[in-house]
């Protein structure tokens, strides 16, 4: 069974969309969350719109501040990185399947 099958719930929204929804659900203004993150509101706005990608450390801090599941947010962030790199590639989906097998191979090799 591949890891794709093991995931029960997949949120297809971008990481930025997920962050914005959670921020709004918590009743926080953009500037309030930005201040807590010690970043400019314009930067946070770009993160939420997907025009800029957060660093993993920022993402973990956002998850904590918004009371989000860190693993789910990191999975979304990682999947965004992959999608944006291969979405327009003719063989992107095939390459993704091969990459999964390579990851499994490398993990076994390290053991």
Image (spheres, grey):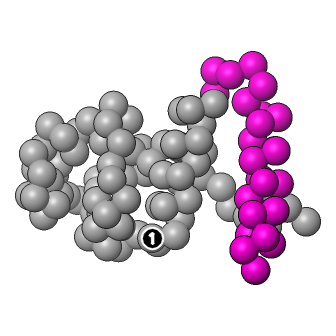
Q: Residue at x 48, y 61 (%)?
A: 74
Look at the picture and state if 92 lies above or below 99.
above
- The quarter holding residue 64 reads bottom left
Q: Residue furthest right?
A: 1
- Say what secondary structure mark 1 lies in: helix
Residue toward you, 62 or 102? 102
Q: Residue at x 45, y 48 (%)?
A: 15
* Residue annotated with mark 1: 70
Residue 78 lies in magenta, yes or no? no
Residue 83 spot, x, y in % from top left: 60, 37
Residue 88 lies in magenta, yes or no? yes
Q: Does residue 95 appear to the left or right of 76 in the view shown?
A: right
Quarter of the image with the C terminus in it: bottom right
Q: Which residues are magenta?
A: 87-111
Q: Main secondary structure of the magenta part?
A: helix
Look at the picture and state if 100 lies above or below 63.
above
Residue 62 spot, x, y in % from top left: 30, 63
Q: Residue furthest bottom?
A: 111
Can the viewer see residue 23?
yes
Quarter of the image with the N terminus in it: bottom right
Look at the picture and state if 90 lies above or below 28.
above
Residue 28 spot, x, y in % from top left: 19, 58
């Amino acid at each position: 069974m591949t890891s794709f099958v093991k995931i029960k719930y997949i949120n297809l929204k971008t990481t930025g969309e997920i962050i914005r929804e959670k921020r709004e659900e918590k009743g926080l203004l953009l500037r309030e969350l930005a201040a807590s993150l010690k970043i400019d509101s314009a930067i946070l706005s770009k993160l939420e719109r997907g025009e800029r990608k957060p660093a993993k450390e920022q993402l973990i801090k956002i998850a904590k501040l918004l009371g989000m599941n860190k693993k789910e947010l990191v999975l979304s962030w990682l999947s965004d990185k992959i999608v944006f790199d291969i979405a327009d590639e003719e063989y992107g989906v095939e390459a993704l399947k091969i990459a999964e097998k390579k990851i499994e191979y490398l993990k076994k090799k390290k053991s």
